[in-house]
Amino acid sequence: MEVEIKLRLPDAAAHRRLSSFLAPRLLRTDAPARPLAAATAAQRNVRLYGTDDRDPSRAVLTLKRRPRIDAGVSRVEEVVEPLDPALALTCIDNPAHLGAVDSPIVRLVSDEYGVGGDKAPFVCLGGFRNTRELDETHFDFGTNYELECETAEPDQAKEVLERLLTSNKFACFMAGKLLP
């Protein structure tokens, strides 16, 4: 049995509001010698949520490491913690300030990778914006599209998504209207 949750949005304004929430600005950080990137593709991001990058409604700090891809299913360790939006903006303006943030992620990165001190301060590697779950990621050099689904059962989710992407949807056409 296939189970889907579909929520209809009332109008374009609601779509814009939801899109602004689902489209965080991500800024990647590392030290100048890029030890995080070299250490099994560890990534450290500051994510800003909201319609204005200079006045985010929410911010988080993330660490992704030890990625594995097996048969099209990606698994990665991810640690996420809230970050005060004003502090996030300070860190974006001066990435070296991340080393002074009192955070389990910052301590882990400092202890395991040696990043965050005066000898290896954080620098910004660049950033991008994407829409969560349905990724349309715009880089300076092109656009990448991915369907993303976070789940505790990735093999089952992959099977369902593959069926969905290879099946045709004629219910609306046959009904002659948009279905609720």
Image: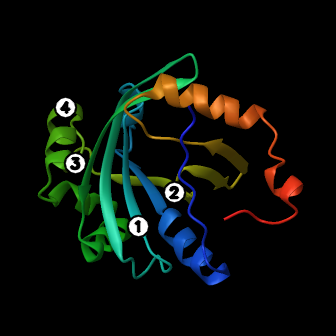
Give the spatial CA distance, label 1 vs label 4. 26 Å
* Left or right of 69, for residue 139: right
Q: Nearer the viewer, mark 2 or mark 1?
A: 1
Which numbered disc, 1 or 3, marks the residue that appears first in the sequence? Answer: 1
| Gap in angstroms between the C-alphas marked 2 and 1 | 11 Å
Q: Is residue 88 left or right of residue 37?
A: left
| Three-letter amino acid code of the residue under disc 4 | Glu
Q: Secondary structure at mark 1?
A: strand
Residue wearing tag 2: 127
Which mark lies nearer to you, 1 or 3?
1
| Residue placed most toward the observer, 65 or 158 | 158
Residue at label 3? Answer: 116
Give how far across and how far down residue 43 sits, in percent: 39, 41
**Image quadrant where one finds the C terminus:** bottom right
Q: Which quadrant of the rendered structure holds the N terminus?
A: top right
Which one is earlier in the sequence, the residue at label 1 or at label 4? Answer: 1
What residue appears at the point 67 percent right and 80 percent down from the top-left corner? Answer: 12
Where does label 4 land, which residue?
112
Image position of 176 (left or right of 38): right
The x, y position of residue 78, in whole percent, is: 32, 39
Under tag 4, what secondary structure?
A: helix
Structural distance between the alpha carbons of marks 4 and 2:
24 Å
Residue at image location 72% in from the left, 62% down from the top: 179
